[in-house]
Image: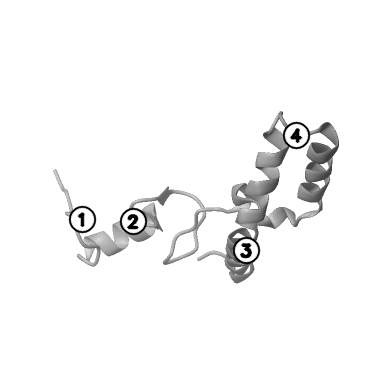
Amino acid sequence: MARKSSIEKNKNREKLVAMHSAKRMRLKAMIKDKELPIEERFNAGLKLSEMPRNGARIRLRNRCQVTGRPRGYYRKFKMSRIALRDLGSTGQVPGLVKSSW
């Protein structure tokens, strides 16, 4: 199980990303727009750099919904390989069939 602080930190980042995503997209579009004057583009860059870093989508980490483990993550099931194997062996994951050979 991952540390509670790491899990909570990632949850706070998810909230910040949801809160700031629209504004960040607008500022990035302004920065990339070559039709705007250079001063406006520069000011948009300054405003973007003043925003919280944890509001960037790249800062999010995929974590297992069961254990909080950050590695060995399966997107389709939203859990780590270890939790998937444990729950899959007991038949608690819909659509997952245990294989043995």
Q: Is residue 25 left or right of residue 35?
A: left
Tell me which numbered mark, 1 or 4, is placed earlier along the sequence: 4
What is the CA distance from the residue labelled 3 to the residue labelled 1? Answer: 35 Å
Which is more foreground, mark 1 or mark 4? 4
For the point 68% across and 33% down, the residue is 33
What type is the residue that disc 1 sits on?
A: Leu
Q: Mark 1 and mark 3 in contact (Cβ < 8 Å)?
A: no
**Of helix, strand and loop, which one carries label 3?**
helix
| Residue located beneath label 4 in the image | 36
For the point 56% across and 53% down, the residue is 61
Q: Mark 4 and mark 3 in contact (Cβ < 8 Å)?
A: no
* Image quarter of the C terminus: top left
| Residue located beneath label 2 in the image | 77
Q: Say the numbered circle drawn on residue 19.
A: 3
The answer to whether residue 48 is above or below residue 65 is above
The answer to whether residue 65 is above or below residue 40 is below
Badge 4 crowding class, 10 Å Cα cut-off, few under 14, some 14 to 19, many 20 or more, is: few
**Of helix, strand and loop, which one carries label 2?**
loop
The quarter holding residue 31 reads: top right
Q: Say the numbered circle drawn on residue 68.
A: none
What type is the residue that disc 4 sits on?
A: Leu
Tell me which numbered mark, 4 or 2, is placed earlier along the sequence: 4
